[in-house]
Image (cartoon, rainbow, N blue to C red):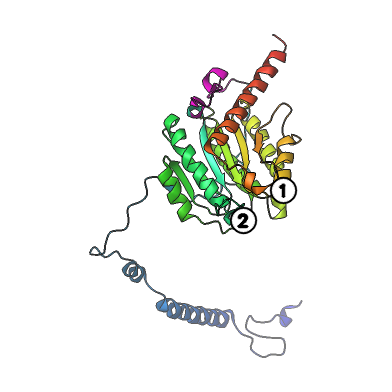
Amino acid sequence: MGGKDRLKPDQSRDGSKSPSRLDFLGRLHRSNTESSQGSNARSEAAPSISDIDKKHAVNPFDDPPEPPPSYEVVVKEAPAYPFAEAWSTSEKLPEYTITKEMVGESLNDPTFLSHFDTVFLIDDSTSMQENDGQGGFTRWNETREALGSVAPICVKYDKDGVDIHFLNDRRVCKNITSEKEVIEVFEAVKPVGYATPLGSRLEYLLCDYLNEYRKNTAIKPINIIVITDGIPSPWPEMNVGERIGKMVHRLLEINKGAQKCQFGIQFFQVGMDEAATEFLKKLDNGREHVPPGWDVIDTATFPQGDSECKPRLTYSEILKVVLGAVNKRLDEEMTVERKLPKK
């Protein structure tokens, strides 16, 4: 382009004057100023921090709040999935080793409870309000009575007491030590849930435990006692065995030498639901999701028939199944050790 055709910065090709850069910057400044003024006007309508503080201030002349219960109620967020990077090692890790001598085989002196943390996971779905022809004694009452009897026995050997979780209610009741506290918990929580999320709740509890185990492999083993009356729902919750198997593999990723009784899950059925009985039996017999030689699931169901003849769930039944499960795993562990070639 020749010099005579060169345009000035503020001139268009038809000779008219085009907007200069200064004009454009001026308009931009006015637009920003107007926007800022509008924003300030809106913010003036919002309450200030001092207003909020005044609204929620505590009056020193009000009656003090009720004292907290003796046990601890905690609402916890589920731990993140998946775990932080798991590690494994061929080195011998410190652990809380359980032996047959420590456990024993007599329910008259259940000292084995002192070597395990005991956690209850309770079905609080609506069907737990039903009774099975036993004078109006509901499944919920049956569960409460069994827990009320077993809690004092557990605390005799473990001063920490037991922890109680529910399938739907997110309250976590820790360090329950008496029948009175069990009754308080069951009065606070009502069986009004419309789901039976066994799989996800068990995965949460085991994930929480393994996160602690990863930090300290010498913590106590854990027994999770599940009391339920029905099959898991909705449908994705049916993969209970698969979820538990995933946690067993995670345990071995953390510690290749973990004992087979590091965690165990015992399912107890209340009620006469035949589908629940069938599901729990299948869960007990299935080992396809766990490593060879591992069996962390035990179930206790009742024979179907006349509901008047159905035995109630009792603390002695709970202790018998838990003790039998621990001894079974220790027996399997000893059998495997005897089969290992000597170095």
Which of the 4 quarters of the picture holds residue 99? top right
116 shown above or below 192: above
Give left or right: position of 106 versus 306.
left
- For the C terminus, the quadrant is top right
Residue farthest to the left, as pictured = 61
Question: Any mark on residue 326, and which?
Answer: none
The magenta segment is: 91-113
Nearest the camera: 220 or 177?
177
Which secondary structure class fits the magenta region best?
Answer: loop
The residue to which callout 2 is attached is: 127
Based on the picture, tell me whether residue 106 belongs to the magenta stretch: yes
213 shown above or below 62: above
* Element marked by disc 1: helix
Which of the 4 quarters of the picture holds residue 262? top right
Disc 1 crowd rating (10 Å Cα; few below 14, some 14-19, many 20+) is some
Question: Residue 305: where, in percent of width, then height?
Answer: 70, 46
**Mark 2 is on which residue type?**
Ser
Q: CA distance from mark 2 to mark 1?
A: 14 Å
* Element marked by disc 2: helix
**Mark 1 is on which residue type?**
Glu
155 shown above or below 259: below
Nearest the camera: 337 or 46?
337
Question: Residue 10: where, in percent of width, then height?
Answer: 62, 83
The residue to which callout 1 is attached is: 274
Residue 257 visible, this orientation: no
Give left or right: position of 60 versus 211.
left
Based on the picture, tell me whether residue 338 belongs to the magenta stretch: no
Disc 2 crowd rating (10 Å Cα; few below 14, some 14-19, many 20+) is many
